[in-house]
Amino acid sequence: MIDKNIIRGYLDELRISTRLDDDGDMVIVQSADEDFGHDVVIFVMVNNNRLSYAAGAPGYEPRQDPYHLANRHNCRRNLPTAVVRDGNVRMECSFLLDEEVSKEYIVENCIKMVLGSIWRAYVDLEKED
């Protein structure tokens, strides 16, 4: 059984700063840098043994059609899934953790890999093949 406190504890151990939003979901902000000039805001939700991520980049307006970019991204990569919501490209991913798995599995595959993949997805979104 997985819950928000367990995931928040793992994030704390990784020295990943979180805050809680009005719905009680965790929020992580990956700060803009020279690779991608916008903050990436990641919402981390834990409900019914499902660990889910929904990310956006406030203020980011792609130079190309967002549906084209999302489709191309999804053809290139399995993780995270790019979706278009309200005209904005979002990155989403979720894991059903209803079976017993190790802490290491969750940290490596369901946290570290996902957070890195979300950032990389925005960095590479408009890059040509």
Image (cartoon, helix red, strand yellow):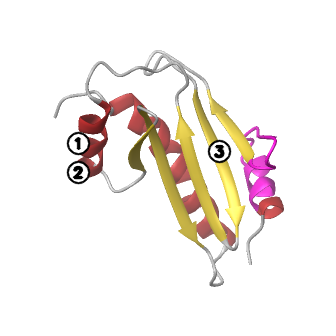
Question: Quadrant where the C terminus lies?
Answer: top left
Q: Where the N terminus falls, by quadrant?
A: bottom right
Quick check: 15 above or below 1? Answer: above
- Residue under pointer 3: 43
Residue closest to the far left: 129
96 relative position to 62: left or right:
right
The answer to whether mark 2 and mark 1 are in CB contact below 8 A is yes
Residue corresponding to mark 1? 72
x and y percentages locating residue 60 in the rendered image: 46, 21
Residue 40: quadrant of the picture: top right
- Identify the element where label 2 is drawn: helix
Total residue callouts:
3
For disc 2, the neighbor class at 10 Å (few under 14, some 14 to 19, many from 20) is few
Q: In this view, does 22 lie above or below 61?
A: below
What kind of element bears circle 3? strand
Q: What stretch is highlighted in magenta?
A: 7-25
Q: Do the residues labelled 2 and 3 touch (CB within 8 Å)?
A: no
Q: Which of 7 and 51 is in front in this view?
A: 51
Label 2: which residue?
A: 75
- Is 9 in the magenta? yes
Q: Distance between the residues labelled 2 and 3?
A: 24 Å
